Amino acid sequence: MRAVFLISIAVGIGLGLTYAWLIDPVEFTTADPYHVDARYQEAWLVMAAEAYVTGDDWDRTQARLDGLGDPNLAQTAAALFERYSANGPNPQARALARLVERLDARAVTAGMLVYLTTPVTPTPRVTSLPTSIPPTRTPAQSTPTPTDAFPTLTPSATPTPEFVVVSSDGVCESGAPQIRVAVQDAEGNGLPGVDVWITWDGGADRFVTGLKPELGPGFGDFDMQPDVSYRVGAGSQSTLALVDNLSADPCTTDTGADGRLSWNVVLQPLTP
């Protein structure tokens, strides 16, 4: 009886191992970041941002971010930036700001611009007054007029723009009005990665061309508000307006519907 019991156990173990190893073996897979706790997902996002700003290529960064499975990744990174930046300037906040800019330039906030732009402190020009030797006076000589006692003020040169305007056309549309900028080379090929600045009285915003590749590598756009006059600049000279007085004025479309003006602006680099 005991032998039968032991044989039954051995047969059962053998059948179980056969099923587990041959019929339905366990498959081990690598867990994606979205499977882990939210704290580790945030750490993954910060590390991906830091790797990106230290010279990692975007394709590798994109693969890391895809593992999070977050459809609103730019907004998630922006919220994480606010938490890090609340503790004062730090490299993690800078990395997150760069990442948000790359993911969606429209998610860039005013606080991020501190990290995205490098302020230039102007060097004051100190012009010393020339030392003049008072002339020797004689009884027959009148008091001279010190015409050379003060330096001659030389006006500063107007900065040379990095880009020129090829065209700027207003289009009456029934949808939300926009400023659409296409940056092209001399052959008409789109240029990605160009900073385009939109400024107005009391505000400024920026986008980078190429973030909407389906519309062209040199394309970028900005949503306009009624009753605001906008200016467009490009490159490092953000305050130098290439086009100004762009406003979403009311208009009538070709179909007779009420609309507002949108603007299509084409820029090219200035050839020295």
Image (cartoon, helix red, strand yellow):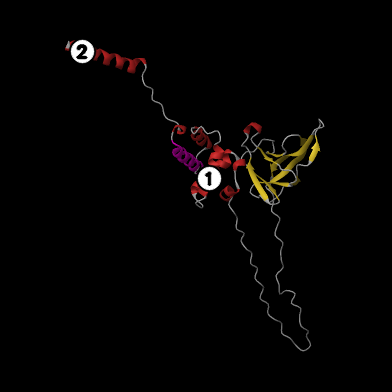
Quadrant in the rendering for residue 15? top left
Looking at the rendering, the stretch of residues picked out in magenta corresponds to 37-53
At 65% across and 46% down in the image, what residue appears? 205
Farthest residue toward the bottom?
139
Using the image, tell me which numbered label, if any, was put on residue 81.
Answer: 1
Quadrant in the rendering for residue 12? top left
Q: Which residue is mark 2?
A: 5
Check if mark 1's residue and mark 2's residue have beta carbons within 8 Å: no
Report if residue 243 is visible in the image. Answer: no
Element on which disc 2 rests = helix
> Is residue 81 part of the magenta span, yes or no?
no
Eye-nearest disc, 1 or 2: 2
Residue in the foreground of this view, choosing between 170 and 83:
83
Q: Quadrant of the N terminus?
A: top left
Judge left or right: residue 13 versus residue 246.
left
Disc 1 or 2, which lies upstream in sequence?
2
Q: Position of residue 248 (x, y in %)?
A: 75, 42
Helix, strand or loop: magenta stretch: helix
Q: Amino acid at mark 2?
A: Phe
Q: Position of residue 245 (x, y in %)?
A: 76, 47
Residue in the foreground of this view, choosing between 139 and 153:
153
Farthest residue toward the front?
1
Q: How many marks?
A: 2
